[in-house]
């Protein structure tokens, strides 16, 4: 698994104190000349410096009790805070092992540029175990329209009845490889991004293999735990639309504005799946909710009820 490879790399190439200094010599437009990474038991920080030694940007990861996952209060999960200059973006998730920094949830272009630098992307992956996911720009690209990438309004069977999935868009590829689903919660304006496995509708590891209970990356309905990003601030809110300029061409896209498009590009969707489902301890499939009782799984009980609910 990729995560294991990164951890092995860490043990071989970083000092015992968990710190790592990286020279950046690509002459980037942001003026970054050095990166520093520091790892703790449940934290990681990448800091970017200019030639004068000024701290100009950072990505901070923390795993523990975080706010913003559930309106009921703090939940165990991960938090990633990205900063550059006076711009900042925050992402939280119940996922704590396979971590992705969603560039779509970074409203300021300069922050996307920052985490998109090769040196930054590489350091986040190798030193922090954090993947930088590709941008879903809201700039159309007609020359990319030949792609085999498909996108559509979300089917109800991919969603729970709560929260309502505002402007929900589902995307994937013709070869049925992994895709994603994204929407904005109408109640708190949070952006939600979840990944879809190639064999949608079953519990799987991130690589598509066997998994047990809460260690599964893809949950009982075939989607990962959600990456949740609050509104960008300064009166701006997230919205979804239907095209972007990226490798895949047209697909689901994210934008931010003070006055979001009305009517929305995608309709709101209320799902019809059951909350509280889980994954069997013995890897035999989903349980709880509309599935078999988790006590009937080959591995007995379960500790992941509702882990993939939002």
Image (tube, rainbow, N blue to C red):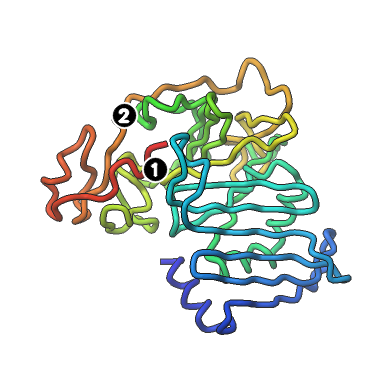
Q: Position of residue 16 (x, y in %)?
A: 55, 84
Task: Give the labeled residue for mark 2.
Answer: 273
Q: Residue furthest top?
A: 263
Q: Which mark is first along the chain, 2 or 1?
A: 1
Q: Which mark is residue 223?
A: 1
179 to the left or right of 133: left
Mark 1 residue element: loop
Q: Position of residue 72 (x, y in %)?
A: 44, 35
Instruction: Tell me the quarter of the picture where residue 253 sits.
Output: top right
Instruction: Residue at 54% x, 58% y: name it.
Output: 62
Q: Residue furthest front?
A: 73
Where is 301 relative to 5, above or below? above
Q: Is residue 43 visible?
A: yes
Instruction: Tell me the quarter of the picture where residue 33 sits.
Output: bottom right
Instruction: Residue at 43% x, 59% y: name it.
Output: 97
20 to the left or right of 298: right
């Amino acid at each position: 698994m990729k995560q294991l490879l990164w951890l092995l790399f860490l043990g071989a190439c970083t000092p015992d104190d968990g710190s790592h200094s990286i020279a950046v010599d690509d002459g980037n437009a942001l003026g970054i000349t050095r990166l520093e990474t520091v790892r703790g038991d449940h934290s990681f920080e990448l800091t970017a410096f200019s030639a004068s030694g000024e701290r100009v940007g950072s990505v901070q990861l923390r795993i523990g009790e975080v706010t913003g996952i559930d309106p009921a209060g703090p939940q165990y999960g991960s938090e990633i805070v990205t900063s550059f200059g006076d711009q900042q973006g925050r992402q939280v998730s119940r996922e704590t092992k396979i971590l992705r920094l969603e560039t779509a949830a970074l409203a300021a272009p300069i922050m996307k540029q920052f985490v998109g630098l090769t040196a930054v992307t590489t350091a986040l992956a190798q030193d922090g175990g954090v993947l930088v996911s590709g941008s879903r720009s809201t700039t159309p690209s007609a020359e990319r329209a030949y792609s085999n990438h498909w996108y559509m309004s979300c089917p109800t069977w991919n969603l729970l009845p709560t929260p309502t999935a505002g402007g929900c868009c589902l995307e994937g590829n013709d070869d049925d490889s992994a895709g994603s689903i994204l929407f904005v919660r109408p109640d708190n304006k949070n952006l939600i991004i979840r990944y879809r496995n190639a064999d949608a509708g079953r519990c799987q590891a991130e690589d598509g293999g066997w998994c047990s209970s809460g260690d599964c990356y893809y949950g009982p309905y075939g989607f990962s735990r959600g990456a949740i990003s609050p509104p960008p601030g300064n009166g701006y809110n997230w919205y979804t639309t239907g095209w972007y300029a990226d490798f895949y061409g047209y697909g689901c896209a994210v934008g931010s504005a003070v006055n979001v498009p009305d009517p929305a590009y995608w309709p709101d969707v209320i799902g019809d799946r059951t909350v509280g489902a889980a994954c069997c301890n013995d890897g035999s499939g989903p349980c709880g909710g509309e599935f078999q009782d988790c006590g009937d799984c080959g591995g007995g009980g379960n500790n992941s009820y509702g882990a993939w609910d939002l």
